[in-house]
Amino acid sequence: MTIKEIHDFVLLLLNKHNTGYSTPGEIDSALDRAQMWYFNRLYGNIEEYQPGRPVPRVAYGMTQAIHDHLSPFKESAQQSSNSSGVITISNANYLHLLSISKSNKTIPILSEDEVAYRLDSHILAPSSTEPIAKISGDGVIQLYPKETHSNVDLDYLVRPAKPVFGFTQSGRTITYASNSSTQMQWNEPALNAIVMRAVNYLGVNLEDALAIQYSEGKIQQGT
């Protein structure tokens, strides 16, 4: 779906529910918030973690559908650390690290407690050929031992591009301009859930049974 088709559908739902008119900018903002809600839900909503249950009901890696929905936002890069073993992912849109490897061998990503244990171990201490990693900040990865690590392969998720409905306006007439628009990157099944959430943000009363059934059903199905 193009951004114009998405806007047209949102306006159709708004008019159907007698909510009124929303500007293109308001719709773009609602779509962006809705896509980030859906992105976080697919990656793993932290609110669904429970004691004794270390994973949420929906999370990255669980199903092929989730992989398909998030595939437009997967990036790969090869970088080298500085002399202290620090890698800073250069992509400004970086959100989540998926995996890190070197010479086709996965580098385990550990918590602070696990790192401390490994560093103090005579048997499992990290080495140049078998390093370990810790996420030290937003896009910052600390490798151990703290030395230069060359040609480290990174796989990560980036932020979805903010949608922009480009247009020209003459009086009250709005004419879509594709060359100044930013399209949404999601596949069409994922857009169903995103659009329904955006419409909710824009003020549609989703106590309507059919609307709830449709939006929640699509989300639960992962489509």
Image: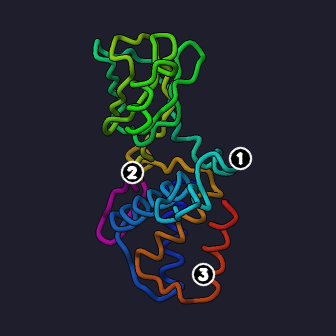
Distance from Cα at disc 1 to Cα at disc 2: 25 Å
Q: Is residue 190 above or below residue 60?
A: below
- Of the residues tagged 3 and 1, which is closer to the observer? 1
Give 192 or 111, whichever is nearer the viewer: 111
Can you give x and y, in whole percent of width and height, for residue 137 in the image? 31, 38
Mark in the foreground, 1 or 2: 1
Q: Which residue is mark 1?
A: 64
Residue 147 found in image quarter = top left
| Residue 171 disc label | none
Specify the label residue 162 is tagged with.
2
Task: Say which quarter of the image contains residue 150.
Answer: top left
Residues in magenta, as a range: 164-176
- Residue nearer the viewer, 70 or 44: 44
- Do the residues under discs 3 and 1 have CB atoms within 8 angstroms? no
Depth check, mark 2 against mark 3: the one in front is 3
Q: Amino acid type of disc 2? A: Lys
Type of amino acid at the residue the image marks with label 1: Gln
Q: Answer yes or no: do the residues labelled 2 and 3 have beta carbons within 8 Å?
A: no
- Magenta region, main secondary structure: strand
Residue neighbourhood size for the residue with mark 1, other residues' Cα within 10 Å, grouped as few (<14), some (14–19), many (≥20) = few
Q: Residue furthest front?
A: 122
